[in-house]
Amino acid sequence: MAMLVLALLPLLATSASAAGGCAAEASLSSPNGNAYAACSDLPRLGATVHWTYDGAAGSLSVAFVAAPAAPGGWVAWGLNPFGEGMAGAQALLAAPSSSSGAWAVRTYNISGYALGAPGPIAFPATGLAAELGADGRVRVSGTLSVGQGAAVLNQVWQVGSAVSGDGIPAPHAMGGDNLAAKAKLDLVRQTTSSSDSGGSGLARERNIHGILNAVSWGLLLPMGAIFARYLKTFRSADPAWFYLHVTCQIIGYGVGVAGWATGINLGNASNGVTYGLHRSIGIAAFALATLQVTI
């Protein structure tokens, strides 16, 4: 019985996350003193979002709580009316003042994969405020006009480690959690859900890319070379070694082409994200393999 309970714990945790709820700060209230209607622990960067949606007024009161990547860093949360991810996000970014140290919130209409300058956003914002808690986490709150009848919104969030002397946030890290910091905000069901699970979207394509190239460059092509190098020394293996060599090389190259194609597609779908060394190694390996096949 105990083993059954332990086995079911991950499923129960997943269900609780999908249904909303926060592990901490359950009693967090909005600036007007009213408790937020919903709360959810976000799946990345240890962040939490609290919100109340007034359908009649079309307003979304929100409080985003997260710790900066380092002391003196920044935190940001936003909604993207154009799609998932950073490009197109209408963001609230909180950072400390270089002179007084007081936290302030600025709005950003992020048109690409660079933050740009602060300015008006598509969702008119009022009551913006930010404060640093004793636990090192920053609370960013405000009210956004998202319109009547809003149901499911794309939300993104991020944390950074530094702010320059003139108040410009330094770029955030490019780790897996940073790149995957996005989710759906369901105003009707009062839940959040991940926008890109491990079995779909870019994450799934990255897995396919890795598996294809591991099978090609790490298994089939080396096996073909081993057959040609060692089996041909045995007279009894002639001409079997040659057919094994050719079969492994042809299949390995074909699988490598598929891995190359998925890599190109991933690059095209990941604007602003470049892995220079990885790309250079891939180009060199594919060029040498193609040369070997053609001569």
Image: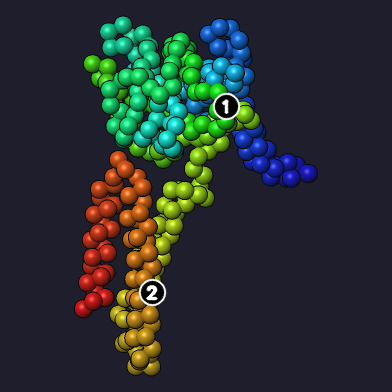
Image point (38%, 88%), residue name: 240
Q: Quadrant of residue 181?
A: top left
Q: Quadrant of residue 282?
A: bottom left
Q: Which mark is residue 248?
A: none
Query: Foreground residue, 202 or 187?
Result: 187
Label 2 residue SS: helix
- Horizontal arrangement in the rendering, residue 23 relative to residue 209 (left or right): right
- Horizontal arrangement in the rendering, residue 10 relative to residue 250 (left or right): right
Query: Foreground residue, 84 or 97?
Result: 84
Q: Nearer the viewer, mark 1 or mark 2?
A: 1
Image point (31%, 35%), residue name: 113
Q: Is residue 259 above or below residue 178?
A: below
Percent coordinates x, y for residue 187 in the rendering: 58, 27
Q: Which residue is mark 2?
A: 251
Residue type at mark 1?
Gly
Mark 1 neighbour density, 10 Å: few (under 14) some (14–19) many (20 or more): few
Q: Which residue is mark 1?
A: 149
Image point (38%, 93%), residue name: 236
Dividing the image into 4 quarters, which one contains the C terminus?
bottom left
Q: Residue furthest right?
A: 1
Q: Quadrant of residue 70?
A: top left
